[in-house]
Image (cartoon, helix red, strand yellow):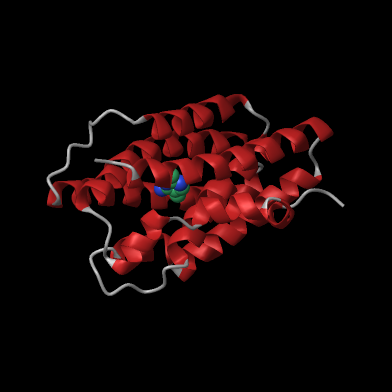
Amino acid sequence: MSLTCEKLVADNAEMWRSATIHPFLDGCRDGTIRLDQFHTWLVQDYRFVVEFTRFAARLLADAPVPHFDTLLGGLQALQDELTWFRAKAEERDLDLSTPPLPGCQKYNAMMAELHDAAYPVKATAFWAIERAYNEAWGRLGALDNAYGEFAERWGNEGFGEYVRALALQADEALANASADEVARATKAFVTVADYEQGFWQMAFAAG
Ligand code: HMH
């Protein structure tokens, strides 16, 4: 049996919980998050998504042709997302050129380091990053407050389908991966879980 995305989540259940359940998210659900905390997340996540877009392009460059459709759809969604982030920042008068904080910086550095990794490693990390947000925001459900559109962006059913398609592609790549690549993919998954937790904490601790 080869490694699968589901097995990674199951084998690291506690870490994954910490990556996707956090007081920052509870605060968005309850409306108790402070603006400085939320705005820190918003600006830092824009900086993250810029680097994530470069990572998506590298993933596409290495992908087998049958994986193009899902990844090109993902790149299209990222174009929309970057435009949306700029609109949200403008509405809230936020400066998107604010330098990345350490929790964002190390996550961005990790993605840049993965540029040279084998396709199964990149595909696993990319899926994990999208899955984390789908699960974290999706768990909040429909929100009747200012954070509803944020939860909806990553928690919606279409995004869930995209994440499942990414998992199938990563699983397929892992089935054909070397033992070393499987080990590196596992390490990348654990790092994503760790850095996701750190990213929420970075925003929550702001101010
Ligand atoms: C920190 N993880 C972080 N930001 C995001 N936007 C995503 C995952 C999903 O795109």
Picture coordinates of residue 123 (x, y %)?
62, 43
Observer-nearest residue: 142 or 176? 142
Residue 9 in which image quadrant = bottom right
Direction from residue 124 to residue 20 in the image, left or right: left
Picture coordinates of residue 155 (x, y %)?
44, 65
Residue 181 in which image quadrant = top right
Residue at image location 43% in from the left, 61% down from the top? 137
Picture coordinates of residue 186 (x, y %)?
70, 40
Q: Is residue 114 visible?
A: yes
Image quarter where the C terminus lies is top left
Direction from residue 148 to residue 22 in the image, left or right: right
Residue at image location 66% in from the left, 55% down from the top? 13
Direction from residue 171 to residue 37 in the image, left or right: left
Residue 120 in which image quadrant = top right
Direction from residue 51 to residue 62 in the image, left or right: right
Observer-nearest residue: 83 or 61? 83
Q: Is residue 63 visible?
A: no
Picture coordinates of residue 89 (x, y %)?
19, 46
Residue at image location 27% in from the left, 51% down from the top? 38
Does residue 158 lie above or below 47 as drawn?
A: below
Q: What is the count of numbered marks?
A: 0
